[in-house]
């Protein structure tokens, strides 16, 4: 079955076409056919497309909206021998408390996604546009929604409730939802596969460190805590997001800078984190380069805060879980930056992490253990693959197969 995976963002539409089936899933032989990204939708957009194993092609093309962008993709697919699309899998950011699993899209599911739109006003409406556009472009083709929040619906009440007036939860659904769930779930699934473990034996802490960063405490295969909250702003320090902060800061800055609250929130989302502290960049590669040459101003400080915060969360999750078997790095930074992994792990000798320095230095975007065989708490790198999980969930839903993770 050819599954078109779609990820509709504020002005972007990413796609990948994946051939998969229960047999291919079992053999881990799903076939990646082609992929692409369209950026700048709403004006002169930039489309980049590539067939597997071939060079990327890019062009500028005016695309007014998601419907036009999808038509561009569908036309390219047909012209390049990929006319057959048997199913569409959509990344949907927020499933609120309505979706604890992926779902085949019908009118009820569409209503559910709409009902969660106030929780993710920038994302869910765009995801919905993608769904509406693809159901028009591929009428009769089954579509599935895979939610960023679903994996964290197993959080117990004591972990998902904020210590605020309870009716904020009952009336406004104020609670921790967590994000990056598809990534944490995929990484946990791969860890189990590599270690040949049953789901109930999976006790790990996953660190998704990319431009957005989050951590999940996964006990007996289920997410029991995660660092992002009601919105993706909470938790670890990120590329441009602050992560945790005292909420009292908001009114102080709003009044002293004479800023409306939305502007303060905007600064916390887009001008904080690595960018905010360094004043240079949100890109860890750039900060590492600057810090190495000793001329990075606050680049080194930004990296130090980033690693310190990650260590604090690791310690907290070890306590929350009563110990774990492994910590697993993923995301652009987690997969590629050996120095950052080392700085996070090195603070964890007391908890039994013995980093294999040579192994760690070599690992880039591949699955590998980076701790010594004697390490009491192992450390792994496992590249994430949200598109693959979306394609697999879509096929399993269509065929009525229970997903194992
Ligand atoms: P993601 O959001 O998962 O795509 O991750 C993007 C981030 O990964 C970028 O902003 C970079 O900061 C970081 N990144 C990618 N490659 C490297 C690398 N080799 N070293 C350090 N950071 C990296």
Image: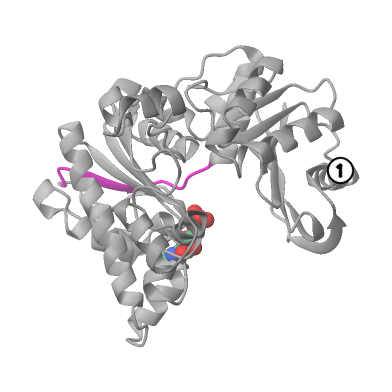
Which sits in the foreground, 141 or 148?
Answer: 148
| Magenta stretch secondary structure, dominant | loop
The single residue placed furthest to the left in the displayed view is 350
Is residue 196 something that shows in the picture? yes
Residue 56: which quarter of the image? bottom right
Whether 105 is drawn above or below 94: the answer is: above
Tell me the residue at 35%/83% (across/down).
297
Q: Does 344 appear in magenta?
A: no
Residue 171: which quarter of the image? top left
The spot of residue 224 in percent (x, y) is 30, 29
Q: Does 379 appear in magenta?
A: yes
Left or right: residue 245 versus residue 12 is left
Which sits in the foreground, 117 or 398?
Answer: 117
The spot of residue 87 in percent (x, y) is 73, 26
Left or right: residue 188 versus residue 396 is left
The spot of residue 113 in percent (x, y) is 62, 27
Q: Which residues are magenta?
A: 375-385
Residue receiving disc 1: 71
Q: Secondary structure at mark 1?
A: helix
Tell me the residue at 18%/46% (across/down).
315
Left or right: residue 24 versus residue 53 is left
Quadrant, the C terminus: top left
Left or right: residue 260 versus residue 252 is right
Tell me the residue at 65%/29% (across/down).
20
């Amino acid at each position: 079955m050819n599954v078109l995976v779609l990820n509709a963002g504020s002005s972007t539409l990413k796609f990948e076409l994946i051939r998969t089936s229960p047999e291919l899933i079992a053999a881990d032989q799903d076939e990646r056919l082609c992929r692409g990204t369209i950026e700048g939708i709403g004006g002169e957009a930039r489309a980049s497309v590539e067939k597997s194993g071939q060079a990327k092609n890019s062009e500028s093309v005016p695309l007014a909206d998601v419907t036009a962008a999808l038509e561009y993709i569908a036309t390219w697919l047909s012209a390049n021998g990929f006319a057959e699309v048997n199913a569409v899998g959509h990344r949907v950011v927020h499933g609120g408390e309505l979706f604890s699993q992926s779902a085949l899209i019908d009118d009820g599911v569409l209503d559910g996604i709409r009902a969660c739109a106030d929780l993710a006003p920038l994302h869910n409406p765009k995801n919905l546009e993608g769904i509406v556009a693809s159901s028009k472009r591929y009428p009769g083709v089954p579509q599935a929604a895979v939610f960023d929040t679903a994996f964290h619906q197993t959080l117990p009440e004591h972990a998902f409730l904020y210590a605020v007036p309870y009716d904020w939860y009952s009336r406004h659904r104020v609670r921790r939802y967590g994000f990056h769930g598809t990534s944490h779930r995929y990484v946990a699934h791969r860890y189990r596969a590599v270690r040949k473990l049953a789901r109930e034996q999976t006790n790990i802490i996953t660190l998704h460190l990319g431009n957005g960063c989050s951590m999940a405490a996964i006990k007996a295969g289920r997410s029991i805590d995660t660092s992002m909250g009601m919105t993706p702003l909470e938790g670890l320090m990120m590329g441009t997001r602050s992560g945790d902060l005292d909420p009292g800061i908001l009114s102080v800055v709003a009044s002293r800078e004479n800023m409306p609250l939305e502007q303060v929130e905007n600064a916390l989302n887009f001008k904080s984190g690595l960018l905010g502290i360094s004043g240079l960049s949100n890109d860890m590669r750039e900060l590492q380069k600057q810090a190495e040459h000793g001329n990075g101003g606050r680049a080194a400080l930004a990296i130090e805060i980033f690693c310190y915060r990650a260590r604090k969360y690791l310690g907290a999750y070890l306590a929350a879980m009563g110990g774990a078997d492994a910590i697993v790095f993923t995301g652009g930074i987690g997969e590629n930056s050996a120095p950052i992994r080392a700085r996070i792990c090195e603070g964890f000798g007391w908890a039994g992490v013995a980093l294999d320095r040579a192994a760690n230095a070599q690992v880039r975007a591949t699955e590998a253990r980076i701790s010594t065989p004697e390490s009491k708490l192992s450390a792994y790198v496992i590249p994430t693959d949200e598109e693959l999980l979306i394609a697999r969930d879509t096929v399993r839903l269509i065929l009525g197969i229970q997903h194992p993770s």
